[in-house]
Amino acid sequence: MASLRKRGKHWYYRYVDANGISRERKGCPDRRETEALAAGCEAEVAKAKAGLIDPKDLLLREHEQRPIANHLADWKRDMLARGKTARHAEQFLERAGKLAALSHGSKLSDLETNRTRRAIERASTALAKSLNSTHLSDLTPDRVQAALAVLRNAGKSNQTVNHYRAALRAFAHWAVDKGRLNTSPLRGVKGFNVEEDRRHERRSLTDAELTSLIATAQNGPDVWGMSGSLRAMAYRLAAATGFRASEIRSLTPESFQLTRSAPVVLLRASATKNRRPVEQPLSQAIVADLMSWLSDKTPGAPALPLHHETAKAMKTDLEAAGIEYETEEGVADFHSLRAYFVSALVRSGASIKEVQTLARHAKPQTTLAHYAKVSAHELRKAVDALPAPAVMPARRFAIDLRSEADQPIGMRFAHPLPIAGDGEGHIESESGGIAPQDPQKHKTPEVPVVAELGRQLAVTDGSGTERGGFEPPKGCDTLNGLANRRFRPLSHLSRLHAN
């Protein structure tokens, strides 16, 4: 028997589901209507126990009645329990929630925020209100696709819009795995081509620029709470290993194995992007500096405690060093040091497989398309290193300059081929000039003509046997053209000639 209790203006009823779990649902302000809802819920539980209703359907119906804000909160707790960082969980929750609110019909202007506290509070209130009135059934492919179009039309890049789609898709997959949805509502929702709208193309620093950047940071003041020596060592390590800023933050003194014959730095699986452990080789040029840097570091503590605004700190060092932040090739931020690492490997002569493995990319196309940078100077050097092409001798072609009406039919339809002569009985001499042909040498043999028949026949050596010939053509059919010309042996004509 369901039990009722009143909280505020609404009644709530508690019942036991088909699995024996006690659950509570929100009813109505009226007690009788709440009792009717409780009775209907108990009837469904009874049918489920009798096998008349699938218990999964009841569970899906129960999840559908909860607002999507509750599901998103459960998803965030699950991400933290699975080892995701708080920043990752907050970012995915914000993107998935905003896209769900837009799918429900909220305006993007109400959800956008700026740096003022009042705007942030207003947007947070509008987002929470929208999510509390949104349910899982509101996430349909058409609505989600339209919400992505709203973000794109508002000026967000294709890459950013795809990030929103990836966050909501991760939530939908989690809901399916937990039995809260039958299928993912994002099936059929298409992303956008990133290559058509790249707004943050990175470039690789040159050797001279990297040297100047490190020297400037080493002698510079503190930026974003990071000392100059910390920033300089982080730049050197990123350029020597290709590690990302988040990966460098996760390193401890125990991560560096510098006393081995082949020094390496270790990354745990939870700190990498592909969630796989890394054992990255280190060059001997940086080992001595790392030993000096780690000599006074606390075991277990971050070896290079970088601020999360590493890109802004590097931009400050670039300005102090007189290096342009943005050029025609792209911008130079902290992740550009990873591009420098890959480009340096390519210049050193490493194979594509070696570069791909050291960069930890799943596909070589990613390595070549986005990280292996080539400057215009290097392209010019590569072209200048090509061998000189062989000089091809000039050839003369017979060209008939007469009009098409005056040309023979064979010249009008035949494929033009190079010939040795000039088409007027002259051939090219050894000295390169045009010499007349010998009329006796190139004389065409005469063919006897049978006067009685008025046509040429191929005659034999006197044995009386004709090798072949053609009978006179009959009149052409205007519809069939030359299709009624027939070729057949002319033995009957040979007999007439013999007589």
Image: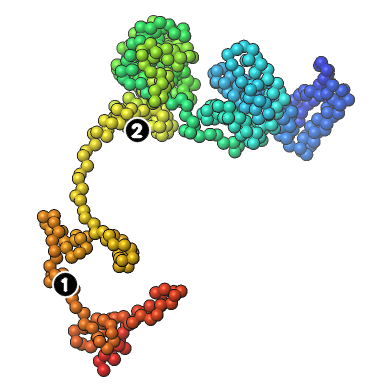
Reading the image, the residue beneath label 1 is 443
> Which residue is most to the bottom?
499
Q: In front of the other: label 2 or label 1? A: 1
> The N terminus is located in which quarter?
top right
Q: Is residue 350 above or below residue 240?
A: below
Res. 480 image quadrant:
bottom left
Q: Hey, what amino acid is under mark 2?
A: Ile
Residue 137 appears at what percent x and percent y?
Answer: 70, 32
Whether residue 271 appears in this view of the structure is yes
Q: Secondary structure at mark 1?
A: loop
Whether residue 267 appears in this view of the structure is no
Horizontal relation, residue 148 to residue 456: left or right = right
Horizontal relation, residue 355 to residue 436: left or right = right
Whole-angstrom CA distance, mark 2 to mark 1, is 66 Å
Q: Hey, what amino acid is under mark 1?
A: Lys
Instruction: Identify the residue at image location x=76%, y=37%.
Output: 53
Res. 86 image quadrant:
top right
> Which residue is most to the right?
32
Instruction: Identify the residue at image location x=38%, y=78%.
Output: 485
Instruction: Identify the residue at image location x=22%, y=60%.
Output: 419
Q: Nearer the viewer, residue 455 or 300?
A: 455
Reading the image, the residue beneath label 2 is 352
Horizontal relation, residue 443 to residue 373: left or right = left
Q: Is residue 495 above or below residue 38?
A: below
